[in-house]
Image: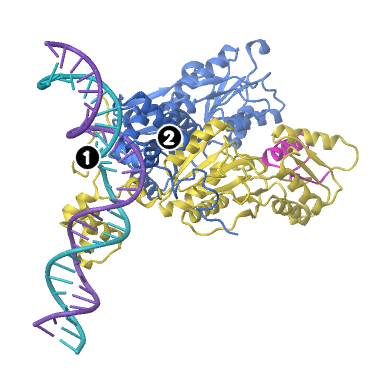
Chain colours: A blue, B yellow, C cyan, D purple
Amino acid sequence: MSLQKEEGLNISGGKRGRITIHEVAAAAAVSISTASKALNDTGRMGSETRERVKRIAAEIGYRPNALARGLLSKRSFTVGLLTNDTYGRFTLPVMAGISDALVDHGVSVFLCAIEDDPALAQIHVDAMLDKQVDGIIATGKRLDRRLPVDLSNLHVPVVYAFTEGTQNSVTFRSDDEQGARLAVEWLVKIGRRRIAHITGPEDFFSVRERAGAYHEVAGHREPVLYGVWSESWGHDAVEQLWKRPGEKPDALFCGNDQIARGAVDALRERGVKVPQDVSVIGFDNWEIVAAQTRPPLTTVDMELKELGRQAGLTVLALAEGRPVEPGVRKLPCRLIVRQSCGSKASTE
Amino acid sequence: MSLQKEEGLNISGGKRGRITIHEVAAAAAVSISTASKALNDTGRMGSETRERVKRIAAEIGYRPNALARGLLSKRSFTVGLLTNDTYGRFTLPVMAGISDALVDHGVSVFLCAIEDDPALAQIHVDAMLDKQVDGIIATGKRLDRRLPVDLSNLHVPVVYAFTEGTQNSVTFRSDDEQGARLAVEWLVKIGRRRIAHITGPEDFFSVRERAGAYHEVAGHREPVLYGVWSESWGHDAVEQLWKRPGEKPDALFCGNDQIARGAVDALRERGVKVPQDVSVIGFDNWEIVAAQTRPPLTTVDMELKELGRQAGLTVLALAEGRPVEPGVRKLPCRLIVRQSCGSKASTE
DNA sequence: GTGACATGAGAAAAGCTTTTACCAACTTGC
DNA sequence: GCAAGTTGGTAAAAGCTTTTCTCATGTCAC
């Protein structure tokens, strides 16, 4: 036996294909326009008629065809999410936030993963435009890089989230400076004084921002170690720090959770106790890394879901013609306290 | 200054809104039907006319409105991907495969993350049906669980990928038995004899399948340790094994990469060398875990991207009315060799 | 009883594309 | 010279919904 589209019983029982407003009108013995107005709560008609049409529509399971509706209203109730973040580390929470914010408005999301491939990106953008998306949200894995496609002169609104936008666009990003301050202030608050900073490549804007905030709060007593975003770098950096003569740091502020994890592992191997001897704090709150580290990492969450939510609401506002101030919106980070720092009590 | 939809210069320069086939027809001084036939390579007309229309259409940047097209053709060139895997561990590769397979056919993908919430799932399904999706692909995080929504009597084709399907449906899944066999046979091949199996909860179908294959290949000399899908369980399991009196295993086949990572860490802490003393092999090839473990994990890849690709092509075939045999299709896994097992040479 | 007005409902157009049916002009064959 | 066929193109319908305009009926005031 083989499967074809039309197989299986047709619940709605109507003639082949979907059930349209024609069926509703016929079943209620009214005209199509009356049926439409009844269902949309527009126009004038007897409330008895309106209720009857609604009831019958519900009974026979009528659902309006969004294509036809979109053709007329110029709204497809669809937005596109363009991303070059293949791991989904950043895209997934952003996507969850967008979807969460828009599902109530009947908006669905096309996810288009372009892997830094301009041609692929263009294909996806064209496909989305053909499908009359109400707007596009561009997201990436880096605040200071553009997607490999120009979205600046589309005739649909574009919102940037966690990627660099264009002049006069709306961009949402995390406030890395504030996040870093949150982390370092926490370390200070629990009594740490010799706080080192192990982080990613210096050419990342967010790395420089975080390092700047670190210096502001912690001063310049300990060095900043720039490297790459990997566990092994965190591991190596600890080796470097502990091989140096003189006093060792009593806290590590790491540029992301992977680095933090590598650092924690290196400390354990050296017999340095976390958090008793050294507090370690990460960045990103990537659950799979942060929560599985022993001890689980205290870290900074960039609130990407909230970021996605706001990006979604903004693109919706623009699609509906509501005015939105252009500019870069920095969203605050949040400190997630787990066990890798100890607390004021436990370090005294 | 505030942004509204219509701002920015309109490149196409036409009157407000998109440029339609009317504009093409007018610019080429032909009727609309002629323009349509020219662009679609249908109907009869002079090749000179056809070329001229095509050229002009390209010049003024005409792109057909997919909504109007879909209204007529009953094809929206859109499919929905429904998932309850919030981490994206399984969904992302599947999504990448689907997108990869379908982008060439002009098909875009709605991603709908429902978090085991039946109401949310229903909302998303309804929204997709309203938008006339050509088909739905259901995917999850577990082979032996259903999504919390009934997709069996929709009038669009449904394909299941990495989640349990319904009677008479098409389901794609990884061949975990073959994957497990691949892993254990590799351990045997490099000379290991005392192979233990540390894995997840026994109520997972795939856990039982993998354990079955393990027993077939390795015999019953070493125990199977069932637990949970976490690093700490991998860690604890090694403790258990090494605390027992008698000979220790010389290889660990772990139910996933997280468990394997926990096991590797525990072995290192005990001073047991990986891979010299003990070979460790994981499952999943979750890069972020497997590649960052020290040493990087040899593991089994479930080829989820390929799975997604096939699911995408299948739902497309069904949407086009091509016949497809129902049933469960098991796709082979692939062994990814890194450094956690050593090789025949290095263990002799 | 009639002009003004409110009410309830339907006809038709619009939105954009594709497809079918058709028409006019031209060619061919005898 | 004319029936038959070919060629190049157009008009119109269909697909589904919403919106505007129109119409018929009933009510009210005077």
Mark carried by residue B10: 1
Image location (x, y in percent) of residue B29: 15, 56
- Quadrant where the C terminus of chain A sits is top right
Q: How many marks?
A: 2
Amino acid under label 2? Ala
Q: Which residue is mark 2?
A: A57
Chain assignment, label 1: B
Give the residue drawn at x 51%, y 18%. A182
Report the residue at 43% width, 34% height from top: A56
The verdict on residue A30 being magenta is no
C-alpha distance separating marks 1 and 2: 42 Å
Q: Nearer the viewer, residue D3 or A237?
A: D3
Q: Is residue A213 above or below residue B322?
A: above
Q: Position of residue B219 (x, y in %)?
A: 84, 51
Residue nearest the viewer, comparing B270 with A121: A121
Indicate the position of residue A343 as horizontal and vertical percent values.
63, 14
Q: Are marks 1 and 2 in contact (CB under 8 Å)?
A: no
Asked which secondary structure carries label 2, the reply is: helix
Q: Is residue A208 visible?
A: no
Element marked by disc 1: loop
Kind of residue at badge 1 = Asn
Magenta-span inclusion, residue B255: yes
The magenta stretch is B249-274
Q: Classify mark 2: residues with Cα within 10 Å, few (<14), some (14-19) or many (20+).
A: many
On the same chain, marks 1 and 2? The answer is no
Quadrant in the rendering for residue B288:
top right
Q: Is residue B228 left or right of residue A56?
A: right
Q: Is residue B260 above or below residue B3?
A: below
What residue lies at 83% left-to-right and 37% top-to-bottom?
B241
A345 versus B288 height, above or below: above
Is residue B273 toward the left or the right of residue A87 in the image?
right
Marked residue chain, label 2: A
